[in-house]
């Protein structure tokens, strides 16, 4: 049971609209299933120039529908997934012409 989404906008720090859009797309494709308890793998592809680190954290923040919310999160924190269950993560750059963001998440066997 895995989920994969693509998005037209790379979520970057301070761009909450892009983070919300990716999270909402992921939630819709996840279909309200229970969060994965972990361990989990995640594969993140980003197109375009610049650092991969800058958009990586905002993209991982969108995983809450699949990972569940970390109970340490405060109500004022809109994004606080249980990202500690991600035990395998690949972040890669894709060539121009590919979707700006492609994100896949699933249980680790």
Image (tube, helix red, strand yellow):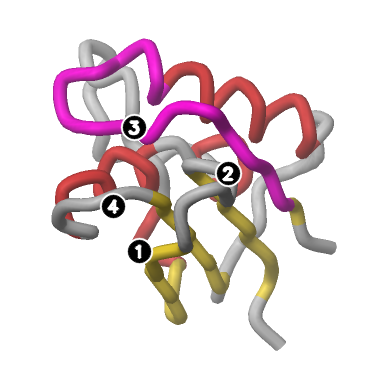
Mark 2 or mark 3, which is nearer to you?
2
Direction front: furthest residue: 97
Residue 68 against residue 44 in the figure, above or below: above
Is the C-beta separation of discs 2 and 3 under 8 Å? no
Mark 1 or mark 2, which is nearer to you?
2
- Label 1: how many Cα within 10 Å (few below 14, some 14–19, many 20+): few
The image quadrant that residue 109 belongs to is bottom right
The image quadrant that residue 91 belongs to is bottom left
Q: Which residue is mark 3?
A: 11
Is the C-beta separation of discs 4 and 3 under 8 Å? no
Q: Earlier in the sequence, mark 4 or mark 3?
A: 3
**Mark 4 and mark 2: span between their CA atoms?**
15 Å
**Mark 2 and mark 3: span between their CA atoms?**
13 Å
Q: Which residues are magenta?
A: 4-19
- Label 3: how many Cα within 10 Å (few below 14, some 14–19, many 20+): many
Residue at the (77%, 38%) spot, across then down: 30
Q: Earlier in the sequence, mark 2 or mark 3?
A: 3
Residue 38 against residue 17 in the figure, above or below: below
Tell me the element at label 1: helix
Direction bottom: furthest residue: 109
Q: Which residue is mark 2?
A: 99
Q: Which residue is mark 1?
A: 84
- Label 2: how many Cα within 10 Å (few below 14, some 14–19, many 20+): some
Mark 1 or mark 4, which is nearer to you?
4
Q: Which residue is mark 4?
A: 56
Q: Earlier in the sequence, mark 1 or mark 2?
A: 1
């Amino acid at each position: 049971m895995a989920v994969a989404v693509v998005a037209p906008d790379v979520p970057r720090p301070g761009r909450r609209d892009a983070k919300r859009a990716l999270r909402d797309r992921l939630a819709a494709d996840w279909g309200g299933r229970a969060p994965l308890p972990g361990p989990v793998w995640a594969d993140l592809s980003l197109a375009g120039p610049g650092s991969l680190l800058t958009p990586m954290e905002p993209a991982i923040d969108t995983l809450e529908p699949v990972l569940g919310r970390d109970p340490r999160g405060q109500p004022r924190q809109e994004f606080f997934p249980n990202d500690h269950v991600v035990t395998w993560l690949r972040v890669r750059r894709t060539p121009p012409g590919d979707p700006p963001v492609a994100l896949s998440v699933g249980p680790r066997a």
